[in-house]
Image (tube, helix red, strand yellow):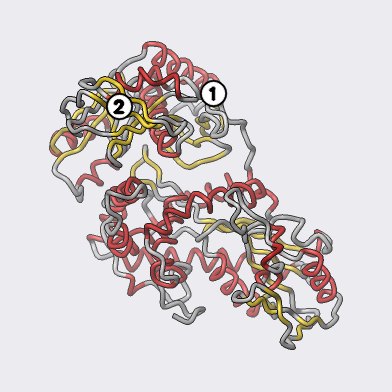
Amino acid sequence: MINKPLPERVHVLLPTGETLPVAGGRSLQEVGAEVQLYYAAPIVAAIVENELYELTATVKTPATVQFLDLTDQEGQRIYRRSLTFLLIAAAYELFPEAVVTVEHSLGKGLYCEIKKSPELSTADVTAIERRMRQLVKMDLPIKKRRVPLSEAAQIFRRQGFEDKLALLKNWPKDYLNLYRIDGMEDTLYGYHVPRTGLLDIFELKHYPPGLILRFPDEEDPSRVAPFVEQKKLFEIFREAERWGAILGFDTVGAMNRLIEEGEGSEVIRIAEALHEKKIAQIADLISASGSEIRVILVAGPSSSGKTTFAQRLRTQLLVNGLRPLPISIDNYFVDREHTPLDESSNPDFEHIEAIDLPLFNEHLLRLIEGKEVEIPIYNFTTGKREYRGQIMRLDENQPLIIEGIHGLNETLTRAIPRRNKFKIYISALTALNIDRHTRIHTTDTRLLRRIVRDAQFRGNSALETIRCWPSVRRGEERDIFRLQEEADIMFNSALVYELAVIKEQAEFLLNQIDRSQPEYIDARRLLSFLSFFLPLEPSGVPSNSLLREFIGQSCFFET
């Protein structure tokens, strides 16, 4: 971080789009305090000349400053990271012998486990929250210092953080930034807010065997987001943890060690075998229903691997004596002039009303009744449906497989009784952590998958993929995530080794985004994240792997 004085005049770009000149020669925190009244939520960081800065920093050249608050996605990341650090500090202060593990997102919050004896109780969670609020009220500085790796290793060894020590072995720099709250020193590999007093919007919820750290609501950062029960999602994350135990590691440092020891191919084989076993189990569930299941729906967010999963499920169903047939929702798009528009007045092809629902349901009903249907072909050039004599008819042992983002939505298949449908939710729910205190965001895993795939198969740059990602995410929130618990079963498409395999290709693409682009900040964040991994050769990835959908040479696609 640059530690030099601000210029005499700093131009602050306000949320209204106006530019406000203010006196320079001060830290960003001081300038932010002067303009805070223009922001809907607390300022937590700043962008100066398209570079992300902590509020404790200063810069030397005349610049335009854009402050980030909790209405900004990067601001939310920083706030949540700092709040997680506050939880860790309070937990270790109260229970020094405990092991704190940050696991995964859940219920609009973050699920964490605090392993101790006796087991974590409601009273313990209340005590941790009380101490967190005391630290907030004290408004302590969150101090940052840069230390040589040898000193960081001594600190982590003294604290018993063996997982962090393992990561330091292949650390890409010769130093590490450490942060301190009260007596606790740690790093969560990213920027923090400058003071604990900013972290007053949170709640803890006891969620055995752990707890949920509840964050500010994205829509209204002045309050904690409402809790959303997600029992099925929680169970699939627990399953991922069990898989981690089978593989013998759950952090990047431990995986790097296996790669160094030449065990990378073994990790790939075990991870792929776990996928195959789970897909076979799902096929067995469907087959056990006899002829009742007529429509299999596969839904999930972008880059979750839906297409490859559907193909592999079909193979397993064939093994069980069923002969499933796919049907493409894309062929049922309404004519382009009738496509709903998004908030920017552009055609919204992801909207469920972009599908001719009456025709789609009529055809589904006729098919499961054993009748013939002429399936339309959507001409993406003309934006109209065409009929080219493609006739489809189902026998009793031929369920339909439908893959798409709306599969969990009853509106899509409203003419088909629920008992005749089997709904599968698929997403890349990463079980691997950077270390016990720092999780890997599932959204980042999917974004990296999409960056690599789009460059290879769609001719899109990383810049274009990152630029459209917020729109993709809004569609997921609207059409997918709210319906997750409607699934009959969930499938975790994450592969613990995948980021090591796509690392070098993704780094090459991300490095093409220069500092003049707003997406540069996201690119640097992803590059920093990828630097934790040792590379792993893709040659050992089997041709039917879900990862092949993104890196190429899949046996299911022409590449």
Whether residue 251 is visible to the viewer of this picture, yes or no, is no
When the figure is inspected, residue 366 is found, relative to residue 12, above or below; the finding is below
Relative to the observer, which residue lies in front, 234 or 188? 188
When the figure is inspected, residue 235 is found, relative to residue 325, above or below; the finding is above
Type of the residue with mark 1: Ser
**Of the image marks 2 and 1, the number of the one nearer the N terminus:** 2
When the figure is inspected, residue 192 is found, relative to residue 260, above or below; the finding is above
The answer to which image quadrant residue 538 occupies is bottom left
Secondary structure category for the residue under label 2: loop
Mark-to-mark CA distance, 2 and 1: 21 Å
- Residue at 56% x, 23% y is 122
Label 2, on which residue? 55
- Residue at 86% x, 75% y is 369
Whether residue 232 is visible to the viewer of this picture, yes or no, is yes
Label 1, on which residue? 222
Q: Position of residue 504 (x, y in %)?
A: 28, 63
Disc 1 crowd, CA 10 A, few/some/many (<14, 14-19, 20+): some
Q: Is residue 511 left or right of residue 249?
A: left
Look at the image and tell me in which quarter the N terminus lies: top left
- Judged from this view, the residue extending furthest toward the bottom is 389
Q: Position of residue 172 (x, y in %)?
A: 19, 49
Give the mark count. Answer: 2
Look at the image and tell me in which quarter the C terminus lies: bottom left
Relative to the observer, which residue lies in front, 267 or 56? 56
- Residue at 36% x, 33% y is 66
Q: Position of residue 89 (x, y in %)?
A: 36, 24
Type of the residue with mark 2: Leu
